[in-house]
Image: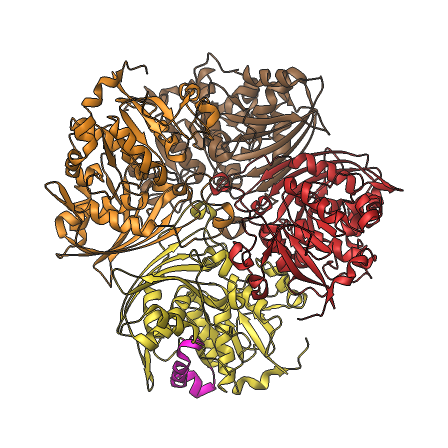
Chain colours: A orange, B yellow, C red, D brown
Amino acid sequence: MRQKVGILGATGMVGQRFIQLLEHHPWFEVAWLAASDRSSGKKYGEAVKWKLDSALPERIARMPVSPATPDDAPKVIFAALDADIARDLEPAFAAAGCAVISNSSAFRMHEDVPLVIPEVNADHLAILENQSWRREAGGYIVTNPNCSAIGLVLALKPLAERFGIESIFVSTMQAVSGAGYPGVASMDILGNVVPFIKNEEEKMQAETLRLLGERGGKVVRPLAAKMTAHCNRVAVEDGHTESVSVKFSKNAGREEILAAWREFRPLAGRDLPTAPSQPVEFTDLEDRPQPRLDKMRGGGMAATVGRLRPCSLLDWKFTVLSHNTIRGAAGAALLNAELLVSLGKLEAQKIDTVAVTA
Amino acid sequence: MRQKVGILGATGMVGQRFIQLLEHHPWFEVAWLAASDRSSGKKYGEAVKWKLDSALPERIARMPVSPATPDDAPKVIFAALDADIARDLEPAFAAAGCAVISNSSAFRMHEDVPLVIPEVNADHLAILENQSWRREAGGYIVTNPNCSAIGLVLALKPLAERFGIESIFVSTMQAVSGAGYPGVASMDILGNVVPFIKNEEEKMQAETLRLLGERGGKVVRPLAAKMTAHCNRVAVEDGHTESVSVKFSKNAGREEILAAWREFRPLAGRDLPTAPSQPVEFTDLEDRPQPRLDKMRGGGMAATVGRLRPCSLLDWKFTVLSHNTIRGAAGAALLNAELLVSLGKLEAQKIDTVAVTA
Amino acid sequence: MRQKVGILGATGMVGQRFIQLLEHHPWFEVAWLAASDRSSGKKYGEAVKWKLDSALPERIARMPVSPATPDDAPKVIFAALDADIARDLEPAFAAAGCAVISNSSAFRMHEDVPLVIPEVNADHLAILENQSWRREAGGYIVTNPNCSAIGLVLALKPLAERFGIESIFVSTMQAVSGAGYPGVASMDILGNVVPFIKNEEEKMQAETLRLLGERGGKVVRPLAAKMTAHCNRVAVEDGHTESVSVKFSKNAGREEILAAWREFRPLAGRDLPTAPSQPVEFTDLEDRPQPRLDKMRGGGMAATVGRLRPCSLLDWKFTVLSHNTIRGAAGAALLNAELLVSLGKLEAQKIDTVAVTA
Amino acid sequence: MRQKVGILGATGMVGQRFIQLLEHHPWFEVAWLAASDRSSGKKYGEAVKWKLDSALPERIARMPVSPATPDDAPKVIFAALDADIARDLEPAFAAAGCAVISNSSAFRMHEDVPLVIPEVNADHLAILENQSWRREAGGYIVTNPNCSAIGLVLALKPLAERFGIESIFVSTMQAVSGAGYPGVASMDILGNVVPFIKNEEEKMQAETLRLLGERGGKVVRPLAAKMTAHCNRVAVEDGHTESVSVKFSKNAGREEILAAWREFRPLAGRDLPTAPSQPVEFTDLEDRPQPRLDKMRGGGMAATVGRLRPCSLLDWKFTVLSHNTIRGAAGAALLNAELLVSLGKLEAQKIDTVAVTA
């Protein structure tokens, strides 16, 4: 038996990734697709401009696109909406009793909404019990971070645990798929760098500190570290590359850092289908990680770190890379959903299962 | 009357830029071209794989490529050699009485060799008088910095003067032309970022601090600031973009910083043909500077700064862009030569003039 | 005295090129700018997203954007409108007595509207006298061809004159700037080819045959040749590259073909400021022409041909390249306007002059 | 039991693809790797600059690189050598009794060497019995075509069978991986098209006609059609896109052509592991096939055709795309080897088996 799930914003870039990643999922089955009014009523195959290099599954192509209302929606919803739209729609679905697993920024910093990376701060999920929707209808909203924060935080978490983190400097080189479709105009990025992504630095800074923060009862206190981000767009299709310098509270040697990354397997034993066995992979090739070659490590769910070397300003510097629409978006939400299943927090929604058909 | 000059390494990417920039120069005329043994003896037009988008001048195409020895060379030499080759050849030319205006890294950090950006540290030229070649034969070596350092230092110098600089963080996104030809393989950079350029971070850090340092008599003391560089290669043909954070010794407000850049015109009055009237141009467009749109400001000799905003780790952050083969290489050396003329340091070489033909 | 001109569609990619090319024009001065209602009333500098690598002239930045009506417009109008909008607006301006020099496809195939490349079919201009607007108000519409047709026709015209043309095969690799801004999404073109441009093959085929056709009195009869076009979009910013095979009516040897191109200077003696001295430049480098290196020949107004070799299916094959937004758009219209001046067909509009200010 | 195979030229781009495709192969196991003298003696993991986005298998990384001599080599050899080297080495291995399954151009046009695409001309394999190596030592050479020919021929074969082909026009847009590593310089291809690939047009024309030719006894007679090719390099990592026009001997309607492609399954029933179930896939999306989205169809082994439309010069035109290093190189050779197994022509080599380990 697989659980029926729905996708809000199913025709966008992240919506397409949800479909791709869910196609052979052992626990979930896509049973409902919603998109904007323009698409509603069409077959999905006619409504979507499919931009992935795997084929659009035929079963999905034939599914109708539903209106974006909770009426006939399953009780588990993956949401890939623009923030403006999410702000209205996600609460409506939560209020209707849906578990809304959201990739949108709309509620990430809301005090009662968990912002979670399963390997990093699974315990933050507890605060979803504060949500009025949860109490009143069983529904809730859980979010994953911005695509630029997620690789960074995966690389920092094992270091924060062992050495404490005082300062973080990061400069990103982000792929165009992060901006959706049509997103970045080719005239803006061919042979070019755009040193600006609207609101990205603010989100990246706030979310990183929240993810590395500590939950005290019903509240998450952000990490008390200094952090600054420079966000840049480059001519890469998929995969965000980030130059990072970090200052620790304690002395940390090279081997200790490598051990911290190597031994970071907080989900070991949970058997979550989308979890990579090694969430942070280190490469000692001098010119890696690179998006073209490393973004698909761990099925696109691992962060790859490399170029670890002393920093003459802070303590250490390195490069981290992660796939922005898998680990940084649809895969992140999917892993959150798997964690919720594992924690029994999708139980109320479990009535919604279907016979496994694949 | 224009002064005859020669080019060492004339067939490479920087050698080609020298030819392009010197084509209509009011003071200098290319009279001698040298390259590797493989090219020597051929016509330049046959020896070169011309990669610029302006036409190879016909006069130059017909010139023979000479062996790389000082015998028949003019007394003013622009050198665009790989460091390994420069280490042998440049001293040979200096010992033969030539003023060697070098773009190579071989002698940049040598204590008696000036590493100079005319707008930044013209007074460092004085140390060339320490060189034994100068005393014995009148010749000398003067160098310009690495293409990654030059835009950064132009942006920092006016701030260092007014506010003092304590810490510098920089993360670069460098164009492929900086690696010469064939240089970076297309398989390495299409849809990709390479977070490594051999020795680049070390050079960028050391040269920046030396350029911002102070001359005390015969010695240059590097700036006593902390600095860290992350150097990355991106899919851009020309133009290095750099994300910079900086900490000052004194408080500096936004308007003061803008004024420092705007009023930075240290060469005003010298009438150097290649000097841009505004060496540091500020743009207040939110998504600029960009290499495709801004690299040719000031004829490729201006550094463009933008995105000035507070830094939550140091004091301020901004983006700086400069053309890596004009301001960062051939144009840098040419401006050094013009400054040397202006200071009377090419006088001994001035016997070497020719009637202006253009 | 320079003639005042206006630009319809001034904020688009081609509108920007008009501004750039007209900035130092000896005959024309931009006196009026119009764009969509959204821009109307703003300063041009605020309304435009300037995407060229030369600076937006300050005088232009301060000019107001006018509504797109002929009321206060000058009598010479460069039009860079989408076809749908041009279909309504251009006749309105012609009916108001304006000479509308249009880059739009809306009227290119209209029997009374000249479709002209000055070097190719200047005599077709005569048919503008058929236009009712001309008779009633002095105004008219003159058009230039699609950016994909113009380089091809320049290369073919001298061959058609000497050898006759029976069949033309062309496969294009077109730059993204041809689609305007935002135009092609980066997700569609990075590391990719798009083998489709809407209506492009049809336009390219019809326009090519019309341009090479003969005027008989008031009518243009298209060339009676067979032609097929394949149009593709590639990851190039500017410059359309085209693979061409052609069958002649007479035998043509390699030297004869080269002579035909070399001697093709139909505008010699007219002194049109934007006309290149050599409209078709041949390169014998084995791997040229290339857009990055050759698009700016003749100030962006020359077509570069290369790789001339026998074709085992038709007679000869070669590659042709031209700049799609200069020779293929704004420069094409500007050269048409210069030709009209030279022919006395802008006389009625000449009252509109201004003192030369530059 | 799997058969032990060796790879000649194992460190190059095609050698790497062989390793990737053979990693989980049910019939073959890589047991021997050879490369140039420079690599010989090292571990493969140290000798190779791995450029694929899947991980280098650890077992392979630890294997030694052998000298390129047949002494200890297995009897089945995949060869990915430059033509110059292949000319000497491949005969040496064949003379030593090896089945040399070659991707090189060295012997493709040799009268006794089969040039084969299994779906197209499997019967041409018979001519390998003419080879003296075969008679004397059991060894032989079998080749697959150039990466530019293979997709074209797959698309043409079903049409040739049903309608006869008289004329072929093709213009290619080829990926950089076809040139190996480092191959195409980034300075040559970023924002650019290179309308020249040395010897490519000649190879593509000759090989296409040979592949579509008929075997009469011991001889292959090339197809008596006219063909012309224009070969261009574009900024694409993997996947060759080709614009094709074709003239048939008989009338062919759109539906007949689509049926010919759809029903083309000549390997059905053979169960070759690398054979795609649908060798020619048709897409009716108006802007496809595209390399980024379609190159991996059929595991990288299918050719995708699209944009079928009438040609005003020949009969029909369309676009074809195929993966140049899978279907166009390593996958092509692997499929040839599988066909040879299926035909019993690797029997003599079968003593060389190993226990299946995976």
Q: Residue at x 62, y 59 (%)?
A: C20
Q: Please identify the quarter of the rendering in which residue D219 is found.
A: top right
Horizontally, residue C51 falls left or right of residue A181, namely: right
Residues A200 and B99: in front is A200
Is residue B23 within the magenta segment?
A: no
Horizontally, residue A14 falls left or right of residue D230, namely: left
Q: Residue at x 34, y 78 (%)?
A: B111
Residues B2 and D28: in front is B2
In the displayed image of the protein, which residue is found farthest to the right? C217
In the displayed image of the protein, which residue is found farthest to the left? A217
Q: Is residue A107 visible?
A: yes
Q: Main secondary structure of the magenta part?
A: helix
- The N terminus of chain B sits in image quarter: bottom right
**Magenta residue span:** B116-139
Q: Position of residue C322 (x, y in %)?
A: 66, 49
Q: Please identify the quarter of the rendering in which residue D319 is found.
A: top right
